[in-house]
Amino acid sequence: MTAVTDQDHTEQAGDAGSENGEGSVEEPVGSDADMGGKDGHTRVESAQGSSARAEAGPGRLREEEAGPGRAREEAAHARGEAVETPDGPVDADSAGDWDDGLIARRVTAETEQAAAVEVRGPNAPPAAPLAYDAPLHSRLDALRELVGLSRARLDSRTLAEAGQVLDEAAARRRLSGQHTVVAIAGATGSGKSQLFNTLAGVAISETGVRRPTTAAPIACSWSDGSASLIERLGIPPRLRRRPLQSAESEAQLRGLVLIDLPDHDSAAVQHREHVDRILALVDAVIWVVDPEKYADAMLHERYLRPMAGHAEVMFVVLNQIDRLPGEAAEMVLDDLRRLLDEDGIALGEYGEPGATVLALSALTGDGIGELREALGQFVAERGAPARRIAADVDAAAWRLRPVYATGRRTGLSEEARDDFAARLADAVGATAAGEAAERAWLRNANRACGTPWLRLWRWYQDRREPATGRLPLRAQPDEEATARQRVEQAVRTLADRASAGLPAPWAQAVREAAVRGSQGLPEALDQLTARAGLPPGRPPRPGWWPVAVLAQASMTLLQVAGGLWLVGQIVGVMAPNLGVPVLLMVAGIIGGPLVEWSCRMAARGPARRYGVEAERRLREAASGCGRARVLDPVAAELLRYREVREQYSRVVGV
């Protein structure tokens, strides 16, 4: 029988053997009950510190007497009880055999071969950490920025997967880049443990008809420096092994860390939890299916279909082809490829990237060489960890697509901004204020340039006009209510236009920003209207007004002079001459209205400009208030969405 020692501890094991006068040690094989273990796996005694030496005979194993104390410890190990030591009781799982840091081996009667526990020695050089290429590094940075920008807008459950991908990517990057962790997963009875043992060249994982057979994940490493990777998977040292391989086989799979998982369809919930947890951490996975369960809905719906984006780090192995007669194996393999294609899993055919699909028999060894060669090439490339992280980023980005991507154009157009400003101006009565300013300017011009007699008559008419003949003015509360409704309608319209086409979380954020800004907006507009409305006092007078006033005064003086002249003639104070005074009076009477009409025509342009300027000031004031309170917060939300959309585009590689 052959004994295998861990490469990390070859020298230590040799020293220990020489001190005790021992060579290599072989352990007996017993039943499950004799060997003990919570997970149904065989435990093996260590060679260090032991005074017993085992020798192999034909068909049996013989162990020398070890003494009463050692016998009690071994009996306690077999029962899974604590061991009494000078330092106190020690648990059976961690006592003596496993905390000495040397070799733990398992020997089966069928193969009479051994596998050693993989423990990195103190003198072993640390493995080089994993390095991501520039595109993947950029995508991870973009995803980190995306999560940071989105925390205030999206709930933690939505960002949980992306955060987990970032954590796992950072954790995997700190670990060895020289190793590739590959899990073997499959259903009950698919033969994954047998395939695991065949690849390792030694019976490490228990096989049999009892279901489930594999109760806990087992790790097998083909090279040193993988302890930290296995610790990340939560696999204890007692379940870590080294394969028994020839130098050529070991060189072919150097850097491989193979994990045998429990059945994914196990009745034990803990077993399924082991599978789900480790599948999220390994670099690649080998799915083992058998001719009976290769089309199982649970496998395709729960695992293969959700992991379709991980096709490049996936092997699908049809095991037990020795049970299929004739060409049945090819028919089943073709049907398996069809199902994988329906699941969206790209098949690595014709040199294209995708899953590797093979048919083999772990029992007879048919097809094992092809799988070993594919695994060797896969591990030698050392690209599986980065491809797995990239696939995880793709999966997280695809699930985040509904909250970031949209097929419609988003944002506020200039038309929407202008319409919002126009609605606010209408709410504050900017148009009416401009018209009022224009009328005030004309009224002032008429007063300045009109005839005294006409102004006197108008004043008299205003005094005599009854109040019942006028239209009643609308109450101030009614005007305020109408203005408030118009402002609210303007804000709602703007929010609807700004949020159109946005994903639901960002559309909600835009609406909330608009509603927050609208609070107190009507009152602020009222204050601005009072400050930016008509200026106090009379409107400004143009330069030609004094000339018009002087001309109107002259016409009035002509009328007065002609009238006095006629009165003087009638009284007899002046000589009779009707022509001159009548002419003066006619000139004054006709000239006064003519000057007034001319001034009114000349005043239309300045009055219109004055009204437009008043309307413009009020519109700008209302627009500025609306922009500061509503448009700017809404634009900030749209800018934030634009930033996260750009980061999301970097994450998906666009």
Image: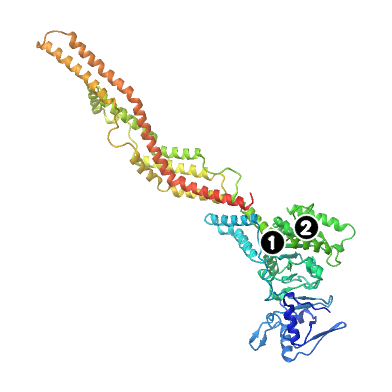
Judge by depth and name the residue closer to the eye, 313 or 597: 313
Report the residue that reaches farthest toward the left.
573
Q: Quadrant of residue 223?
A: bottom right
Residue 385, which numbered label? 1
Rendering coords of residue 496 (x, y %): 51, 44
The mark nearer the N terminus, 1 or 2, is: 2
Q: Are marks 1 and 2 in contact (CB under 8 Å)?
A: no
* Residue 198 in sight in this render: no
Helix, strand or loop for disc 1: helix
Residue 459, placed above or below residue 579:
below
The residue indicated by pointer 2 is 356
Q: Horizontal placement of 49 versus 505: left or right? A: right
Report the residue that reaches farthest toward the right.
326
What's the residue type where badge 1 is placed?
A: Pro
Q: Horizontal placement of 453 versus 251: left or right? A: left
* Residue 585 in sight in this render: yes
Rendering coords of residue 485 (x, y %): 42, 42
Rendering coords of residue 468 (x, y %): 29, 30
Q: Residues within 10 Å of mark 2 (few under 14, many from 20)?
A: many
Q: Quadrant of residue 222?
A: bottom right
Rendering coords of residue 48 (x, y %): 73, 84
Judge by depth and name the residue closer to the eye, 309 or 79: 309
Q: Quadrant of the N terminus?
A: bottom right
What's the residue type where badge 2 is placed?
A: Thr
- The Cα–Cα distance between marks 1 and 2, rounded to whole angstroms, is 17 Å
Judge by depth and name the residue closer to the eye, 207 or 95: 95
Q: Horizontal placement of 501 versus 249: left or right? A: left
Residue 580, placed above or below residue 482:
above
Q: Residue at 46% across / 40% down in the picture?
A: 420
Residue 459, placed above or below residue 633:
above
Q: Residues within 10 Å of mark 1 (few under 14, many from 20)?
A: many
Q: Horizontal placement of 418 versus 5: left or right? A: left
